[in-house]
Image (tube, grey):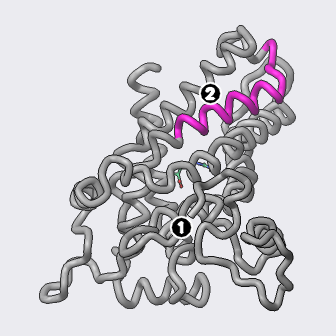
Amino acid sequence: MPVEEFVAGWISGALGLVLGHPFDTVKVRLQTQTTYRGIVDCMVKIYRHESLLGFFKGMSFPIASIAVVNSVLFGVYSNTLLLLTATSHQERRAQPPSYMHIFLAGCTGGFLQAYCLAPFDLIKVRLQNQTEPVAQPGSPPPQYQGPVHCAASIFREEGYRGLFRGAWALMLRDTPTMGIYFITYEGLCHQYTPEGQNPSSATVLVAGGFAGIASWVAATPLDVIKSRMQMDGLRRRVYQGVLDCMDNPMSPLARILQWLSSPSGKAQTPSTLQVPPSPRGFVLLGLLPGP
Ligand SMILES: CN(C)C(=N)NCCC[C@H](N)C(=O)O
């Protein structure tokens, strides 16, 4: 990839991040904290207690890493397509790859991108969740005094693996949804571009926008799990893993699994059913170690 493309990608990615970060902060707070009644309440409270700067907490590491993370995504996507279809980037206009190949290449890009993104995303989420006003003289300092301090604290307290907390949920989120992203993008570009020509800037813009919407609609449930797991373990561990975090003890699935894993093997009526705090009935599936 030429240096100019890398720098252009960095600048455009960083610009998108600055515009989107305030909304991302509200999203992360609503996903992980129970004090807000909704989007507007959350925005008002952040503004009142933390000023405008509160919306931009945790933004520096994503800006610093966006170029590398995007290079991994697009580099892996392009090279996987090359492997699957044996056509170079230039040849692809004349011989478009199948949607199955585009999906598989997108999934591979999303999977590897998530691995690079995981530590940066963890630090972002931890900093976004600090509700202390930014730089108030006299007030107690927040737990993390910046991204480097946050990374060092996690490493000291939880080791190298601590920096990858929530990484599985992130990979589960990004693997299929980046496949969805590329399929939507390529499909729309193909639909609105005359045969043999390159898509216009307007087509690229609209296709990118719709691809982003489609992929985020699919990504949001696992995004909630990811954020909760990233915030887990600050004081004590609540979740044993992705499935445990997804599991709602009152859901029909949890009740069936609890019934299956009850020691006597006997059915319990729903009214007497006690769902243990952890690992909540997934033992029999062999997905988590037993208690
Ligand atoms: C549709 N999906 C899941 C994605 N576009 N994934 C990559 C997002 C990376 C971004 N900094 C974020 O986590 O917000």
Q: In the image, what residue occupies the spot 69% across and 79% down?
A: 275
Residue that appears at 73% across and 30% down: 104
Residue at point 66% right, 37% down?
A: 201
3D distance between C-alphas at marks 2 and 1: 33 Å
Closest to the camera, between mark 2 and mark 1, is: 1
Amino acid type of the residue tagged 1 in the rendering: Tyr
Q: Earlier in the sequence, mark 2 or mark 1?
A: 2
Q: What amino acid type is highlighted by mark number 2?
A: Tyr
Q: Which residues are magenta?
A: 94-113
According to the picture, the residue beneath numbered tag 1 turns out to be 239
The part of the image, by quadrant, that contains residue 216 is bottom right
Horizontally, residue 121 falls left or right of residue 190, namely left
Secondary element type, mark 2: helix
Residue 238 point in image, percent of width and height: 50, 72
Q: Is mark 2 within 8 Å of ligand 1?
A: no
The C terminus sits in image quarter: bottom right
| Residue sitting nearer the eye, 10 or 164 | 164
Q: Main secondary structure of the magenta part?
A: helix
- Specify whether 229 is left or right of 122: right
Residue under label 2: 77
